[in-house]
Image (spheres, rainbow, N blue to C red):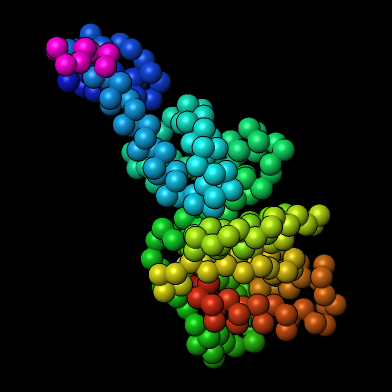
Amino acid sequence: NTPLAHRQTALQSFLLHADPSIIEHVVGDEKADAKQRLDVYFQAYRLRLQEVLATDFEGLHALLGDEGFEQMSLAYIDAYPSQHPSVRWFGRALAGFLAGQYPDRPELAEMAAFEWAWGQAFDAADAPVADDSALAGLDASQWPALTVTLHPSVQQLSLHFNIPAVFAAAVDDKSLPELVHADTAVNWLLWRHELNVHWRSLAGDEFWAMQAAGQGVDFASLCEGLCEWHEPAEVPLRAASLLKTWLGEGLISEVHAG
């Protein structure tokens, strides 16, 4: 490495891991010695990461309060130093971190998971949006092998708490509703449509079908899987209805005829 590259690596190691080896390359003066100068960078870097977390996790901030969120953020920064050139990805391990650090407050991990999914939906790549016309004119023989490509913004997760309602109140700066826990997890869908992120709950059959469709499962196999929830005679209509709903909501980018 060149001397400059070596110093850049040493500075990065100091910011990420508090490695003091960079100090020999820093000159102090009467206003601040080398350690004090480095501390300015160190604290500014950590403050920037705290700001990123506060921006990306407003609902979590509301649940923890200012002091609690600051303490949590600093602990997360220490546990998961930023490894990506973009700070957009800094919070990706937060839900797992919270599950381990706050086992008595599972709503925190759920909020982080929901807000991360929200951010993923918002930042997803642009893609075409198919509509009902994609199904028009399909021959009956084409339906069994029909597959779809979901829009890149589609996200799914399961939650035991009423996290979406709490999140909505937090971002609107309203009083948070009381946390409600359900013994059976509720399935949720998030997606971006016309620059806005939407969400809604999913019945068990739709949750499964959307996951399967996203993995390239064809219409015939979808129908077979839906028999777990419906009588065989009802399944083709239910599967077709789901496809029509997804097309109407902008959840599908492409329909691939068999």
Residue at the image position 70 percent from the left and 73 percent from the top: 220
Picture coordinates of residue 33, whole percent (x, y): 21, 12
Decide: is 13 above or below 149.
above
Quadrant into which the N terminus falls: top left
Magenta-colored stretch includes residue 30: yes
Residue 175, compared with residue 87, is above or below; it is below
> In which image quadrant can residue 168 be found?
bottom right
In the rendering, at what x and y percent does residue 232 appear?
A: 83, 78
Corner quadrant of residue 53 = top left
Type of secondary structure dominating the magenta stretch: loop
Q: Which residue appears at 64% of the width and 84% of the height?
A: 141
Q: Say which of 32 and 136 sits in front.
A: 32
* Residue 113 makes an appearance in the image: no
Q: Is residue 169 found left or right of 184 in the rendered image? A: left
Query: Can you name the residue that lies furthest to the top here?
Result: 24
As displayed, is residue 201 above or below residue 113?
A: below
Q: Kindly give the residue lying farthest to the front in the view shown.
A: 175
- For the point 62% across and 63% down, which residue is it? 165
Span shown in magenta? 29-36
Residue 108: x and y, percent? 62, 45
On-image quarter of the C terminus: bottom right
Location of residue 27 (image quadrant): top left
Q: At x 26% / y 16%, what residue is drawn?
A: 36
Residue 219 shows in this picture: yes
Please provide percent x and percent y for residue 205. 74, 68
Vertical arrangement, residue 214 with respect to residue 253, above or below: above
